[in-house]
DNA sequence: CGACGTATTGACTCGGCTCAAAACCTGTGG
DNA sequence: CCACAGGTTTTGAGCCGAGTCAATACGTCG
């Protein structure tokens, strides 16, 4: 049940093959999954699934952003993970008692590939090589969660923002110091566990302390050393934080 | 290289066999591990390993508590996990590029079984059933980390303490409302990401709001419903939070 | 009893949240 | 091209939660 046009077929195939998980999968299994795949486009705020649901699909993000979050009874939400191009959403549910442990929604207009989760569970159980790839995948996520916990417990708002910016620099070729925010500021704020207003004010403090310039969604880091010293004082890692997790999932 | 006395041999064996991980392991592999095991007693503050070290051992806690933590350059520490009897420490390092991603130290006089990590890595690579057990193990940890992130982002100090107490109740048979704190208050405070003084004051607020009594290390919860309403308002789960993670690792 | 570690209390500061208003974008239609 | 409506970001004022530092109380062990 996949998109019939040649163009869509090949982009889907390429995107899947580029992921670490599909690379580790047997020919037949990956073909089955591919054959059952659907490319879908979703607007902002569309819901992929709700915490507590029984999982039916998992997703590969082709473009845009998906937020994985948990929502309290009085409406507050905590973002657990923001998933961008080349990363999967919901691929861990077979490991989690067959219930979604978080909700997921589109945070920024997104194009996704939707895949049936039953095939994934089967592949894990039957294919050792694939199970190892899943292990690597989960371990990576766990590591970045540990870093996030550390940051939440020990860093102040301005340091967390600085840390976020450093991570963006990390992706850039050889410490490029000009970058573009990947999504809106209020989303970044929520991700970092603070209010939008606090974000706004904390950026000013950051600028005073490290000369970072933020205009619109463009950021300039004139003194990378200054920034990293300011940020990493409250962290167990030092820039450039060894982050093999910036690979594709 | 294991303790030669019959008593120690059998307790070690029993403890290992009781864990989910060893249960999933092949006879030969688990025998090899058992043969290489050492029972050790360590005082408070003894270091198991440091973040960045190359892992040599992993540990099973027989009694006492081990804290897994990350330490910043200016000496602050964030507890990632507090590991008690029946749980492993450092068993995930084979998945993490063969470097410890956290430090670990004894938080409360502990008896441990020390096991060589090389055998563990081999078992994961070669034994599919065991790899699945590791997957389950890591997924469980990831889930409780997600909950912790949620709590840190959305709950105030008093709610986090209440949540901690509810978790303790959960372990108790059928909602027993009298319990004993498992370790010192300042350790609990650090675990929950707050100062000792804040902990002290927040307990008072909790008492005013939910009638929880704390004297010394004894806690009485006269009205469980009241407590859970107070706590779970700021959480995506409701008491009793489905926590299959309270099983042995 | 005295000494040490742990827990509590008090006074103060500061970071971050809340609510409300203003400024700024971006896209739309006249 | 401008005006306007919608969202997002910034600012301001005030409040409250949590950190800090220092002093006191409590417990435990010698």
Image (cartoon, coloured by chain):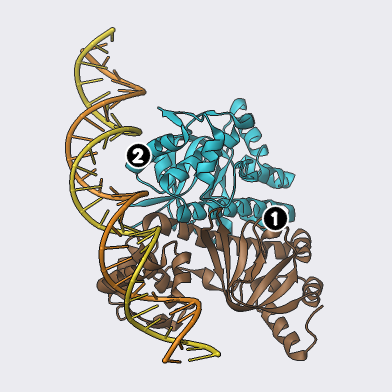
Chain colours: A cyan, B brown, C orange, D yellow
- Chain for disc number 2: A
* Quadrant in which residue C24 is drawn: top left
Residue picked out by circle 2 = A201
The answer to whether residue A173 is seen in the rendering is yes
Determine the secondary structure under disc 2.
helix
Q: Do marks 1 and 2 share a subunit?
A: no
Q: Is B96 placed above or below D2 here? A: below
Task: Look at the image and tell me in which quarter the C terminus of chain A lies.
Answer: top right
What residue is rendered at 77% in x and 71% in y?
B26
Residue nearer the viewer, D1 or A34: D1
Task: Look at the image and tell me in which quarter the N terminus of chain A lies.
Answer: top right
Q: Is residue A150 left or right of residue A30?
A: left
Q: Position of residue B29 (x, y in %)?
A: 79, 70
* Quadrant in which residue B170 is drawn: bottom left
Q: Is A71 placed above or below B107 here? A: above
Q: Position of residue B2 (x, y in %)?
A: 79, 80
Q: Position of residue A205 (x, y in %)?
A: 39, 39
Q: What's the CA distance linking mark 1 and mark 2?
A: 38 Å
- Chain for disc number 1: B
Residue picked out by circle 1 = B99
What residue is rendered at 52% in x and 28% in y?
A222
CB contact under 8 Å: marks 1 and 2: no
Residue nearer the viewer, B113 or A163: A163
What residue is rendered at 74% in x and 53% in y?
A129
Q: Nearer the viewer, mark 1 or mark 2?
A: 2
Determine the secondary structure under disc 1.
loop
């Amino acid at each position: 049940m996949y998109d019939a046009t040649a163009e869509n077929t090949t982009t889907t195939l390429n995107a899947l093959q580029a992921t670490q998980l599909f690379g580790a999968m047997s020919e037949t299994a990956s073909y089955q999954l591919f054959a059952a795949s659907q490319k879908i486009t979703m607007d902002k705020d569309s819901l992929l699934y709700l915490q507590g649901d029984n999982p039916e699909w998992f997703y590969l993000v082709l473009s845009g952003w998906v937020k994985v979050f948990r929502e309290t009874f009085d409406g507050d939400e905590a973002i657990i993970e923001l998933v961008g191009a080349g990363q999967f959403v919901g691929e861990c549910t077979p490991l989690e008692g067959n219930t979604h442990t978080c909700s997921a929604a589109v945070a920024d207009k997104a194009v996704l590939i939707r895949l049936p989760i039953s095939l994934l569970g089967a592949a894990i159980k039957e294919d050792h090589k694939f199970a190892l790839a899943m292990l690597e995948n989960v371990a990576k996520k766990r590591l970045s969660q540990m870093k996030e916990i550390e940051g939440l417990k020990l860093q102040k708002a301005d340091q967390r923002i600085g840390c976020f910016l450093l991570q963006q620099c990390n992706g850039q070729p050889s410490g490029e110091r000009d970058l573009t925010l990947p999504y809106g500021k209020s989303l970044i704020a929520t991700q970092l566990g603070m209010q939008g207003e606090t974000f706004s004010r904390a950026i000013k403090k950051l600028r005073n302390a490290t000369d970072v310039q933020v205009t619109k969604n463009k950021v300039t880091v004139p003194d990378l050393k200054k920034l990293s010293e300011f940020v990493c004082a409250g962290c167990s890692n030092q820039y450039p934080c060894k982050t093999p997790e910036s690979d594709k999932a």
